[in-house]
Amino acid sequence: MTDEQRYEPIRQLLAGFKAFRATYYERNPASMRQLVSEGQKPQVLLIGCSDSRVDPALLTGAEPGELFVVRNVANLVPPYQPDGHYHGTSAAIEYAVRVLNVPHVIILGHAQCGGIQGLIRLRSGESIDGDFVAPWVSIAAGAFDQYADGPGPDQFKGTPAEIERAAIRTSVENLLTFPFIRKKMEAGELELHGWWFDLEEGAIWALSPDHKTFSPVE
């Protein structure tokens, strides 16, 4: 690989930034000036996957300042665990809900999720190289186990899409373990949503209000 080829992705990103600057700082600077002077007031905390194919702002057409976004492997939310250790996702949730007072939280999962595929391999008895991915995806172990009749790959009765959607339900349930989230929900100040993006069809499926089933959004 030549130096030109190696640095082409960086040049493309800088060209994209140039276009962003032209749009939001040169042709229409008012919105960015307002965000600078008044600070951010997003209405949505969106917890999405790190997958490069599923960019929340691109999928939703959101403008700067509209989404407070947290992205991690498999769009997972850990349970509430204030143990003094490093909890990046939980810290972002706390900031969005307690400081920014967002009225909506969305868990955005998707088809063909590599993190969920890793979970399926892990729960089927395979090992995952590395130090961090296996413990992290194990947060959604219950999502796999509800579709398994026993240990081993032959006992797996679900599909990856079913596990992906079940993992979203797990993350919504884990959100409810955060006392400040439950308090705001009981006060009618916060709503939780689960979305699953079908990469092949380009469709969004939404979790029902009782957090039991998914159906395509018309």
Image (cartoon, rainbow, N blue to C red):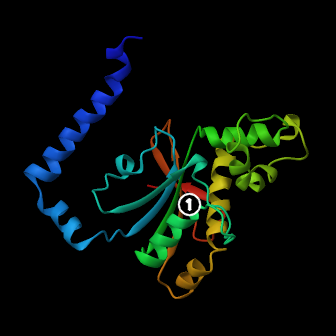
Q: What percent of the width, then of the height, locates residue 149?
A: 89, 47
Read off the residue under disc 1: 89
Residue at 91% x, 45% y is 150
Q: Spot the residue most to the top.
A: 2
**Residue toward you, 70 or 194:** 70
Q: Spot the residue most to the right.
A: 150
Placement of 123 over or under 191, stated as above or below: above
43 relative position to 190: left or right: left
Placement of 165 over or under 121, stated as above or below: below
Q: Can residue 186 be seen in the rendering of this structure?
A: yes
Which element carries disc 1, helix, strand or loop? helix
Residue at 37% x, 11% y is 2
**Residue toward you, 203 or 45:** 45
**Residue toward you, 12 or 153:** 12
Residue at 18% x, 40% y is 19
210 relative position to 205: left or right: right
Q: Spot the residue most to the left.
A: 27
Q: What percent of the width, then of the height, locates residue 13?
A: 30, 34
The quadrant in which the N terminus is found is top left
Residue 42 position by quadrant: bottom left
Q: Can residue 207 be seen in the rendering of this structure?
A: no
Residue at 35% x, 15% y is 3
